[in-house]
Image (tube, helix red, strand yellow):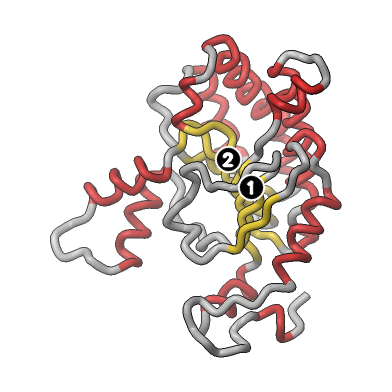
């Protein structure tokens, strides 16, 4: 079975680099933190829209390990926002059948945020409509290094490494990424899911994350469906969508 066929059965895995919050706020004469507050509304819209678009795994890049370099005050506000929104949104996620999993390091996060993450993961563990993965204090390169250090002698297969990578991230079992969406006009991966994105399609939009809505996500998925994915092969018909997948 081809990787595209596997994708068509399991649903899409879409990864989103949520960029442009600070610039959105600055352009409106607002503090950068105002952009993060509005960005949380875009997260809600995206999560609500994802299942209807055939997305079964949604990975959101919320806070990279390099983001610790930002001004202390901005980081403090951002982490408090994460905790507050996790507490407020968890009942809705559970009701919608969304399973929340947070990937990345937790040893450097504030205690209240870690507690909110653990409560949300427990409360939503039974969700089957969508797996929502939020990357906080995440670095793909660091995760790869940790995964490599966990390999046992003789573990040389890709599947074994992928399993160790999932353990290193704190959320194993996710399929490879099908589509990467980056908002805000920049065109780079920024150390996000590098292993999992080996054959991902890339979609860049100038729209800042606070303005991103259901129609924008639908446009990204529609663009993806129009592409042919060969995974290194030269055959012309490996794309499941070209066979009429909705």
Report the residue at 75% width, 65% height from top: 223
Q: Which residue occupies the extreme right position in the image?
A: 215
Q: Earlier in the sequence, mark 2 or mark 1?
A: 1
Q: Nearer the viewer, residue 96 or 16?
A: 16
Do we see residue 53 in this rendering? yes
Instruction: Quickly name the residue at label 1.
Output: 16
> Secondary structure beneath disc 2?
strand
Q: Residue 182: horizontal and vertical position, in percent?
A: 65, 47
Q: Residue 87: horizontal and vertical position, in percent?
A: 66, 26
Instruction: Quickly name the residue at label 2.
Output: 61
Q: Residues within 10 Å of mark 1 (few under 14, many from 20)?
A: many
Do we see residue 132 in this rendering? no
Report the residue at 70% width, 66% height from top: 224
Give the number of callouts: 2
Up-down relation of residue 16 to residue 51 (above or below)? above
> Secondary structure beneath disc 1?
strand
Report the residue at 82% width, 37% height from top: 211
Q: Residue 188: horizontal and vertical position, in percent?
A: 55, 47
Q: Which residue occupies the extreme top position in the image?
A: 73
Q: Which residue occupies the extreme left position in the image?
A: 153
Residue 115 falls left or right of residue 183:
left
Q: Residue 165: horizontal and vertical position, in percent?
A: 36, 52
Q: What numbered label is drawn on residue 181? A: none
For residue 180, what is the image quadrant? bottom right
Q: Residues within 10 Å of mark 2 (few under 14, many from 20)?
A: many
Report the residue at 42% width, 45% height from top: 140
Q: How far is disc 2 from disc 1 in space, using C-alphas?
A: 6 Å
**Quadrant that contains the C terminus:** bottom right
Marks 1 and 2: in contact by CB < 8 Å? yes
Up-down relation of residue 62 to residue 181 (above or below)? above
């Amino acid at each position: 079975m081809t990787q595209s066929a596997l994708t068509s059965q399991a649903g899409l895995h879409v990864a989103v680099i949520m960029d442009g919050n600070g610039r959105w706020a600055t352009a409106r004469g607002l503090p950068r933190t105002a952009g993060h507050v509005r960005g949380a509304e875009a997260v809600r819209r995206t999560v609500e829209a994802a299942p209807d678009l055939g997305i079964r795994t949604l990975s959101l890049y919320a806070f990279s390990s390099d983001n610790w370099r930002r001004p202390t005050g901005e980081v403090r506000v951002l982490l408090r926002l994460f905790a507050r929104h996790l507490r407020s949104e968890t009942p809705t996620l559970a009701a919608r059948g969304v399973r929340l999993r947070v990937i990345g390091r937790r040893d450097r996060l504030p205690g209240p945020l870690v507690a909110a993450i653990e409560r949300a993961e427990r409360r939503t563990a039974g969700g089957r409509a969508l797996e929502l993965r939020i990357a906080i204090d995440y670095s793909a390169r660091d995760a790869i290094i940790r995964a490599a250090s966990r390999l046992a002698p003789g573990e040389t297969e890709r599947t074994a490494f992928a399993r160790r990578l999932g353990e290193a991230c704190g959320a194993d079992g996710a399929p490879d990424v099908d589509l990467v969406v980056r908002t805000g006009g920049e065109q780079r991966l920024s150390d996000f899911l590098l292993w999992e994105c080996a054959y991902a399609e890339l979609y860049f939009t100038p729209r800042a994350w606070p303005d991103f809505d259901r129609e924008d996500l639908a446009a990204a998925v529609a663009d993806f469906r129009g592409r042919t994915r060969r995974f290194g092969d030269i055959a012309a018909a490996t794309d499941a969508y070209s066979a009429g997948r909705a």
